[in-house]
Image (cartoon, rainbow, N blue to C red):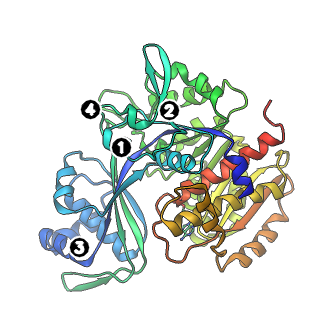
Amino acid sequence: MELLERARELSIYTAYNINVDAIVYLKGEHITKLVNEFGENAIRKRMDEYPREVSEPLDFVARLILALKTGKPMAVPLVNEELHTWFDSHFKYDVERMGGQAGIISNLLASLDFRRVIVYSPTMAEKQARMFVDRPNLHYPVVEGSRLVFKHPYDAYRENDPIKINRIFEFRKGTRFKLGNELIEVPFSGRFILSSRFESIKIETRDELRPFLPEIGEMVDGAILSGYQGIKLRYSDGKDANHYLKRAKEDIMLLKRNKNVRVHLEFASIQNRELRKKVIYNLFPLVDSVGMDESEIAHVLNALGYPELADRIFTYNRIEDTVLGGKILIDEMNLEVLQIHTIYYIMYITHKDNPLSEEELRSSLEVATTLAAARAKLGGIRRPEDFREGLTVPYNERGEFVKLRFEEAKRRTREYKVVIIPTRLVKNPVSTVGLGDTISAGAFTSYLAMLREKGCFV
Ligand code: AMP
């Protein structure tokens, strides 16, 4: 609690992705209806074809049934904007709430009473703006005349801005349905995310705001940037991913005119290998801190040319392989700190000369897992005291094993600081959406608070 209180002194900027998460709690009847509508044969044929994106309803039905059969969480892009009406006529959404990393992180930090949270997204539709918490410390930058002013997002929405809706189908272990004569029972609880990828939603800072980024950089202690998975390789106006990555690089450099500002990039899974590689090579070298989960580090290592190590991480989930991968990444990209979260443990890897001691790094990870546990248990964090709920959640039962494997891995790490803690794991979480973002926001801000106290900021 005490370290979190110190972190709350900070001001944070966060961009770029916000969206509406429309959640459906899937029942057997939903799936039976879809099977009746499309027919077993057509569905099976499409399942064999394994569509990588959803451009018609049958693609969706096929990928959904594949996810249900394996019980594995999956995310597939929806690329046909016209399908909105099909979904809206077939499903009633049980919950609609803030989604997108910047949206989730800004609401979290504002609710925790951080000094100031500036959230930016190039689009701000009314429905979206209503999903921000009503807190006086939460600001959206707007250019009026030629001046920079700050408003609550709700006072800054724009009538005709597009809205991005991600549909999340949460499924429960044990749900049953029939596909022809085959009776399918869902083996694990999880979620199937259909994320909208439309041209109208860009990952960029609008031209009118860009000249003010250095000023915003002066106002904050740190920036948390995310959403690069939403960049498209090609746009119909002839622009491409390189165009948006160049702008993204410039944005980071503009914020960093303030030498003290630290920038964290939250990396999310990028299905397209070419884009993944571009994001890594263009942006990682410019930021100080990167956060990701275990499957993402495997993907990153694959893109950097370490396919065997990546395969090992995918197949065996061994801590020592993840540590090795992490060291490669901080060296090749010259990161100050890398944070990796998995279901059973969270890890920091830094160079030996990091100003924080291993004990301090550990305390930062403790803040992160406690916050995530509080969110999993309560379904959301509404006020600073909610953090205490996280302290009542026990560490997962593999904790001792994690510590043991870590001690073995550590013997080979003289030039680095590697710190690993087991996670506090909620048995029946209210929701698992946004937990990774919560971990990264808690870790980065508490890390920053300690750096500042050490006088690492001039
Ligand atoms: P991501 O895959 O980026 O959304 O991150 C999910 C992270 O949330 C995992 O790595 C865990 O550390 C954490 N997490 C997942 N499930 C739970 C749970 N039931 N209770 C607490 N933390 C969780």
Whole-number angstrom distance, CA of label 2 to CA of label 1:
25 Å
Label annotation for residue 245: 2
Residue 95 against residue 209 in the figure, above or below: below
Mark 1–mark 3 distance (CA, rounded to whole Å): 29 Å
Label 1 residue SS? helix
**Mark closest to the chain's N terminus, 2 or 4:** 4
Q: Say whether residue 404 is left or right of residue 316.
A: right
Q: Are marks 2 and 1 in contact (CB under 8 Å)?
A: no
Position of 259 compared to 251: left or right?
right
Residue 67 to residue 225: above or below: below
Do tag 2 and tag 4 residues touch (Cβ < 8 Å)? no
Horizontal relation, residue 159 to residue 217: left or right: left
Q: Quadrant of the C terminus?
A: top right
| Nearer to us: label 2 or label 4 | 4
* Amino acid marked by disc 3: Ile
Q: What residue lies at 52% left-to-right and 45% top-to-bottom?
A: 106
Return the x and y of residue 150 as percentages of the image width and height: 49, 28
Residue 160's tag is: 4
